[in-house]
Amino acid sequence: MTDKKLANKVLAEWREALGNAEPFPDTEYPYPVNQVLAGSQDLARLKENHIEHNALLLAEAVAACQPEAARFFIPDREVRALLLRLNTATGWALLWGNDDPETAQLASLIQKERFVLFLALPPGSDPALIQGGRDLGNHPTAPIYFLQALARYALIYGRVSPGDDHAFADFLQDHSPGVIFITRSRLSPAEEAMLRDMADLGIPIVLGPNTSVELGLPRAESPQAMVDMALKLPALRVRRQLRYSLDIPFSFDVAYAGEKIEEGPAIGGTPLSFLSLRPEDRGDGIEVVSRMGADVGIEVFVGDPRVDITATDYLEDVAGQLPGYIQGVTCEVKEGCPTIRWRPDMALLPEHLAKAIYHGLKAEFPMQNLKVRLVFDRERLPSLKEAAQTFRDLRQKAVASATEETEPYFYGCFRCHSFALEHACTITPERPPQCDSRTWMHVKARALLSEYTSAGAGGIRLTPSRDAIIEKGRPLDSQRGEWEGANLAAQKHTQGKMRRVFLHSLFGHPHSACSCFQALAFHIPHVDGIGVMARGFKGQTPDGRSWDALANAVAGKQQSGYLPMGRAYLRSAKFLQGDGGWRRVVWMPQELKKAFAADKSWIATEVEAPTLEKLQDFLGHHRWTPSEEDSARAKSHR
């Protein structure tokens, strides 16, 4: 029996053996992993067979059935204390190992680098051999307690909605303080299943030299090399850099971004106030002009040649969030106007805000010449705000007019590649991310400004944040959206499983799917038309397919007849361009049609066409008739 089959067998046994789980105590989230991944506290669902992150959901339920669950569970008050320790600690480290000298040496090195240490040791181990760590027990499900802490970090501080597993994975990849070290020579099949699902969520994992675990994860040659590898992780690097460079008398962390300060001193929120980030070289450093008052202009100038006008859109959003990373401070930006409020007991200075923006941007995006200036001079603010608004108008036009032909590069996102091995996401101004959680400007800024790990390799430059610049190369088929560079990037990142990509056609070689796409175009062969469905629709297509049936047909791979997309793609000028565009669409749910195609009378919904017979009848009276050229192109593309 293969390890995978054995793991499935063990997980099935876990599922059948579930007893009466007791909610974990001293928490607002009695089953935090189930709540963040599935949005549910109903553990009876775990008897079902098809659940994403199956091993993690089951592991938490099994742990809840153990007599010592309350002893090893980390209560909410301790999670908050652990987050507070991140002001001085490098991060959280789970050591999944043995009670042997190698593991003991690694534990010492981990703590020397100021990690908070958690221990998951096998049965019969003596946790006293390793000093200073928090023991999570020796049950096979012990690592789930570590994940529960990360889950509550995301739910409470990251404002991740319960059940939004994609947002949870994004939050972990961008902000997670956690890293897992594996030194155990062999994990059980069920433990490997848990580890695989943790890797899928984006939790960093470093393997020791003597473990048999594979899973395509990085492996180090010694305990010291394991620690060195962890310290280079983007989220931990940012935390370390801020800890040593940000000289303000307050705690600074993304954990405080969700704070709400209802009363206290404030600046901004006035007609003269503004926030603007522009691609201009004004030197490097911070500057405060005049004494602090209610009116404030926050000017951020980036003198880095990699930053153009469209990249500033996302960078400006980040700059507006950074003051809120200071404990006791909130920052809200509406249409370019910031309002910053802080607790009455804080002696907050303008220099503290400027440093938060400057060092926060420098840590997240290593870039040349960055100038942050806070202006309180009421005589200068009107002209400065006018200049900022002029730039915002120019940027809005630049973003709106950007096309695949005008943009110098395409961009790649490989966040889902750990579990979708036949998938590589190609992002352009006219083909935005299919997850809808980010804009193309977001991916562009991270790809351009992150530190490259394989610069120029084969036309693609991959960054630690899993965003990449794609040299787009020559257009091979402008109608269907086939580009030389996009093909090469897909080949590289799927190990040849995908060799061609059509960005704007669902026939032949359509764009591949992850598992978090928000909408899907699909062929309805009975009427030779295209349907479009969005995630969340509870009904069925006229030919009887549900969202799950459609999604399962394409998830994690390239499948002719299906094109995964974000809802934002429905507004693209190149929407399904290779298949005739909106003229080929014959069916979509009513909610989606109202939002994106209310003026297209030839498209039926579940109201007019719940069955194929009804759809055929509807199209007999309403269908747009394709030209001979459209029909010939459609046939040639299949």
Image: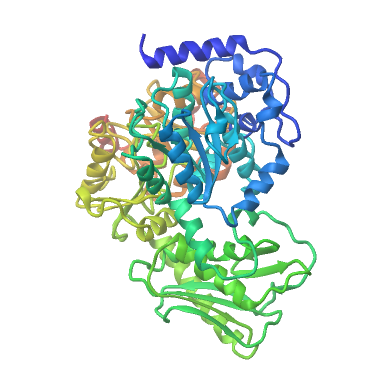
Towards the viewer: 532 or 83: 83
Residue 198 vertical placement versus 614 (above, below): below
Q: Quadrant of the N terminus?
A: top left
Residue 518: percent from left, percent from top: 50, 38
Residue 2: percent from left, percent from top: 36, 12
Residue 218 vertical placement versus 229 (above, below): above
On the picture, is 468 further left or further right than 259? left
On the picture, is 608 further left or further right than 549? right
Towards the viewer: 461 or 583: 461
Task: Please name the residue shown 30% across and 32% down the image.
Answer: 507
Q: Tag count in the figure?
A: 0
Residue 293 vertical placement versus 420 (above, below): below
Towards the viewer: 2 or 298: 2
Image colouring: rainbow
Residue 149 visible in the displayed image: yes
Towards the viewer: 310 or 92: 92
Residue 299: percent from left, percent from top: 53, 77
Residue 623 visible in the displayed image: no
Q: Quadrant of the C terminus?
A: top left
Residue 61 picture quarter: top right
Task: Please name the residue shown 68% across and 69% down the image.
Answer: 340
Residue 262 picture quarter: bottom right
Residue 39: percent from left, percent from top: 64, 31
Q: Residue furthest bottom?
A: 379
Residue 564 vertical placement versus 43 (above, below): below
On the picture, is 457 further left or further right than 425? left
Task: Please name the residue shown 46% across and 14% down the image.
Answer: 8
